[in-house]
């Protein structure tokens, strides 16, 4: 297993010397031993319903139903008639995670007595899993940059994404084909998930992308204590299986692979993103539906997250999990070294564009402020 339960700090975990102000993303700098990454522990979960309302329970958790040997899934079915799409112009920032924290403060594990008895959370970072996925893949990303806003409040640094100008432009100019293909992933979920443990999928129902089940996990990367939440597609149904997150299954769709070039691209680009996303919260398996140009699923394959890095070792110039994790470790150290003032209205904006270093700017009482009044007022009780 790539997870490490060794609690001793190692020489490779220590921050390198670097000039203050920026952080390099050059791969060669991060080719060190794999850093300590503790097995993630689920400390809670929440659900978002068809109207995007928060519920402090697992009502949206679904159960994986293994498809027949040759499935006849048509991912285009229902796109125009049975589809309710979430408004992706609404930026929810960390709000749902913060709601979970307010409702579940007692469930956060603190080994440190002083923090459990005071108002501090006892973790260094709170964020979405998806934001960490972007950090992990940064040394290999050549297309899309990112902006991550960070604020310190009662000793914890909160990290929330800000949409880049380029991402906004993409979102507003998606072609009809792109819009439809975004639906295909959700349709695949509907073909493979049941609402109850002994149920069967209902491909005749409505696909509503407002609905979500999210796990909340705690873990540690070197000396960074992390609490983050990620959306989970479903779980295996055997009740005697491993506890969460070990029972969770990530569902994916991808274009069928017909040529060596397509296989190489799949290994080099797509498996990197799939690995990073599922490794972070400890989701052990990924079920992929490979579809043709017309949205028909032609085959289904299960990937063990822990075996993905072995699968790709034959690719020349391929990505390495250790580079991803060491970069993330150093990025979080960099954020800690920059985000010094404890003030929820102060935002340090970390920005990265491909082929550049990570840089930051500081914004006081600006539109980037993301920790809401209701959170900074109420968290003491
Ligand atoms: O406000 C924002 N800037 C964002 C909010 C950006 C990214 C996510 N979110 C929120 C949403 O509330 C969503 O419910 O995060 C939740 C998912 O968080 P995550 O697990 O940290 O995100 P990620 O790992 O990027 O995506 C997981 C799944 C995706 O599945 P695939 O198989 O495509 O990776 O969450 C879905 C999508 O199904 N998803 C989203 N759902 C709603 N809003 C979003 C989004 N912006 N992005 C991905
Ligand atoms: Ca998915």
Image (cartoon, grey):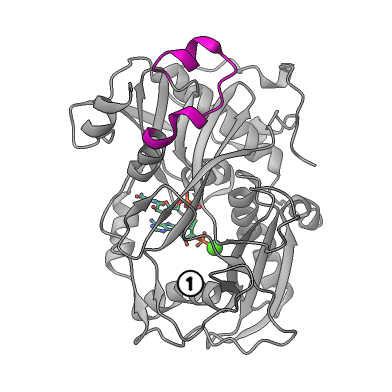
Residue 7 position in % (x across, y down): 73, 20
Query: Residue drawn 50% across and 39% down?
Result: 228
Residue extent of the magenta highlight: 102-120
Answer left or right for 225 relative to 65.
left
Query: Residue drawn 49% across and 23% down?
Result: 124
Name the outermost residue toward the top: 114
Q: Between residues 23 and 127, which one lies in front from this camera angle?
A: 127
- Density class for disc 1 (Cα within 10 Å; few <14, some 14-19, many ≥20) is some
Query: Residue drawn 61% across and 58% down?
Result: 269
Residue 105 among those drawn in magenta: yes
264 over 5 or under it: above or below: below
Q: Secondary structure at mark 1?
A: helix
Q: Between residues 259 and 283, which one lies in front from this camera angle?
A: 283
Q: Quadrant of ligand 2?
A: bottom right
Residue 58 position in % (x across, y down): 49, 54
Q: Between residues 221 and 94, which one lies in front from this camera angle?
A: 94
Residue 78 position in % (x across, y down): 41, 86
111 over 36 or under it: above or below: above
Residue 149 among those drawn in magenta: no
| Quadrant position of the C terminus in the picture | top left
Mark 1: is the Cβ under 8 angstroms from ligand 1?
A: yes
Answer left or right for 24 relative to 52.
right
Give the number of callouts: 1
344 over 248 or under it: above or below: above
| Quadrant position of the N terminus in the picture | top right
342 over 192 or under it: above or below: above
Residue 76 visible to an observer of this rendering? yes
Q: Quadrant of residue 113?
A: top right
Answer left or right for 65 relative to 378.
right
Residue 369 visible to an observer of this rendering? no
Q: Which residue is mark 1?
A: 186
């Amino acid at each position: 297993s790539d997870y490490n339960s060794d609690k001793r700090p190692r020489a490779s975990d220590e921050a390198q010397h670097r000039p203050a102000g920026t952080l390099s993303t050059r791969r060669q700098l991060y080719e060190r031993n794999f850093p300590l990454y503790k097995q993630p522990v689920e400390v809670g979960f929440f659900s978002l319903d068809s109207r995007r309302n928060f519920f402090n329970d697992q009502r949206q958790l679904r159960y994986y139903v293994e498809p027949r040997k040759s499935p006849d899934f048509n991912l285009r079915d229902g796109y125009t008639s049975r589809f309710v799409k979430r408004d992706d112009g609404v930026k929810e920032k960390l709000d749902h995670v913060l709601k979970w924290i307010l409702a579940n403060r007692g469930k956060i594990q603190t080994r440190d007595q002083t923090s459990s008895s005071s108002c501090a959370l006892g973790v260094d970072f709170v964020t979405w899993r998806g934001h960490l996925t972007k950090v992990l893949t940064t040394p290999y990303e050549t297309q899309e940059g990112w902006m991550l806003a960070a604020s310190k409040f009662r000793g914890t640094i909160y990290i929330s994404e800000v949409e880049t100008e380029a991402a906004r432009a993409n979102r507003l100019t998606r072609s009809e084909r792109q819009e439809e293909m975004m639906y295909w992933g959700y349709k695949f979920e509907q073909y493979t998930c049941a609402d109850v443990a002994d149920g069967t999928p209902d491909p005749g129902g409505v696909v509503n992308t407002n609905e979500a089940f999210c796990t909340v996990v705690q873990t540690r990367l070197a000396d960074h204590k992390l609490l983050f939440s990620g959306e989970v597609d479903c779980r295996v149904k055997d009740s005697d299986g491993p506890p969460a997150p070990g029972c969770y299954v990530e569902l994916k769709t991808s274009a069928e692979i017909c040529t060596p070039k397509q296989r190489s691209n799949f290994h080099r680009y797509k498996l990197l993103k799939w690995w990073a996303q599922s490794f972070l919260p400890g989701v052990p398996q990924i079920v992929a539906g490979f579809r043709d140009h017309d949205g028909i699923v032609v085959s289904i394959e299960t990937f063990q997250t822990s075996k993905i890095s072995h699968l790709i070792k034959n690719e020349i110039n391929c990505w390495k999990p250790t580079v991803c994790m060491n970069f993330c470790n150093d990025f979080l150290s960099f954020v800690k070294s920059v985000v010094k003032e404890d003030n929820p209205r102060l935002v340090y904006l970390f920005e990265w564009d491909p082929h550049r270093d990570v840089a930051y700017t500081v914004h006081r009482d600006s539109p980037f402020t993301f920790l809401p009044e209701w959170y900074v007022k109420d968290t003491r009780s």
